[in-house]
Image: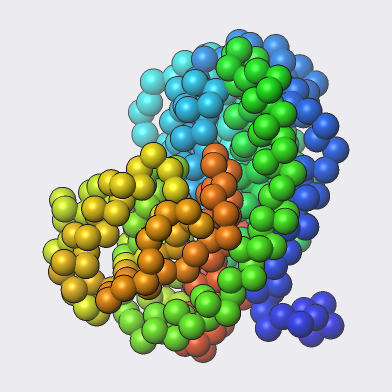
Amino acid sequence: GAAELGPYRHYMQKEIFEQPRAIADTLEGVAGITPELFGDGAYKVFKEVNRVLILACGTSYYSGSTAKYWLESIAKIPTSVEIASEYRYRDSVPDPRTLVVTISQSGETADTLAALKHARALGMPHTLTICNVATSAMVRECKLAYITRAGVEVGVASTKAFTTQLAGLFLLTLALAQVRGHLSDVQEAAHLKAMRHLPAALQAVLALEPQVVAWAEAFARKENALFLGRGLHYPIALEGALKLKEISYIHAEAYPAGELKHGPLALVTSEMPVVTVAPNDALLEKLKSNLQEVRARGGQLYVFADADTRITNAEGLHVIRMPEHYGALSPILHVVPLQLLAYHTAVARGTDVDKPRNLAKSVTVE
Ligand code: G6P
């Protein structure tokens, strides 16, 4: 009820602002990286596996898609990510030395549970879940688990569940890296330090809300939007587009920025806002030239740029500067202004933010 909402207008807004706490709770008690964070017997399983197969739906699929980049770059383990409802019905080639990872906020999504059972029936016994509900079917069905501690999420559009999943998946990446000999003590300490800084870093990003509100006014009048990202932030662009679709009913698509010239550039006009996730990473210079391609066609760019990227406001180029530059954990920070943009655009359009039409919080039937 209204009392629970406190100063917030909707559960979604409250849940966006709970993320510093949710991440702190999810990482509480993590004193160091060890496979046993995922349960008894995890060391033996992590030693045995030589690939990862991630199965999930919706927003959880995008946290898995982000984790693929971490798992391959940090833990050096081949990883594939599959939409659960596709995986369960297609012929695939099973490898018994696969770590099957399901990701689910509710732990009750029918397609994800069925995909897990399908993987097991194909002869892949090593199962692990990243899940927000300790008593769920998903946790009961998997041998190993990491329970995220986002708390109850009421808004249908997932926010704090997503960022806590990313925190859990980053821990999984580090634990696999350690077992596989790719994590020195020095690296472990640096990653842990960066993780402990997340709540404060998130707080600073949340303080950008008034700037995002100003952008939302312009978005509320549009019927289409394009989201761009590269590398590890491509799944974040996908998640940003999904949030906007779900609650504002604006048609949104996400593309890896390098793919613009192979199609979506044809859609760019002054009526098409192009939201860009621009972390200061190895792909920054390439991303900047992608932005030029959009500007040259009169597109309106809305860029979330890291503190040190030197991307600045200009004609057709609107910039919100992120307070820092976050390295490997950057997706956890960069998704937050996209959540806020979707939220405030939906509020400006007057939609039922917490209960968007046709959608359910958890889909327990096929
Ligand atoms: C529904 C929800 C989404 C969620 C998806 C997967 O579609 O509306 O927010 O991402 O289910 O749910 P899960 O509980 O498995 O993460």
Please tell me which residue is depicted at 42% across the width and 54% down the height of the picture: 309
Please tell me which residue is depicted at 22% across the width and 64% down the height of the picture: 294
**Count of residue discs:** 0
Between 340 and 104, the one nearer to me in the picture: 340
- The quadrant of the rendering that contains the N terminus is bottom right
Residue 91, quarter of picture: top left
Between 119 and 288, the one nearer to me in the picture: 288
Between 283 and 217, the one nearer to me in the picture: 283
Vertical position of residue 189 compared to residue 84: above or below = above
Vertical position of residue 168 compared to residue 269: above or below = above
Residue 271, quarter of picture: bottom left
Viewer can see residue 115: no
Q: Is residue 356 left or right of residue 275?
A: right
Q: Is residue 27 left or right of residue 205?
A: right
* x then y, percent, for residue 327: 54, 42
Q: Is residue 43 left or right of residue 338?
A: right
* x then y, percent, for residue 9: 68, 83
Vertical position of residue 185 compared to residue 254: above or below = above
* x then y, percent, for residue 185: 70, 19
* x then y, percent, for residue 71: 52, 29
Q: How is the image coloured?
A: rainbow
Viewer can see residue 87: yes
Q: Is residue 271 left or right of residue 32?
A: left
Please tell me which residue is depicted at 44% across the width and 38% down the height of the picture: 82
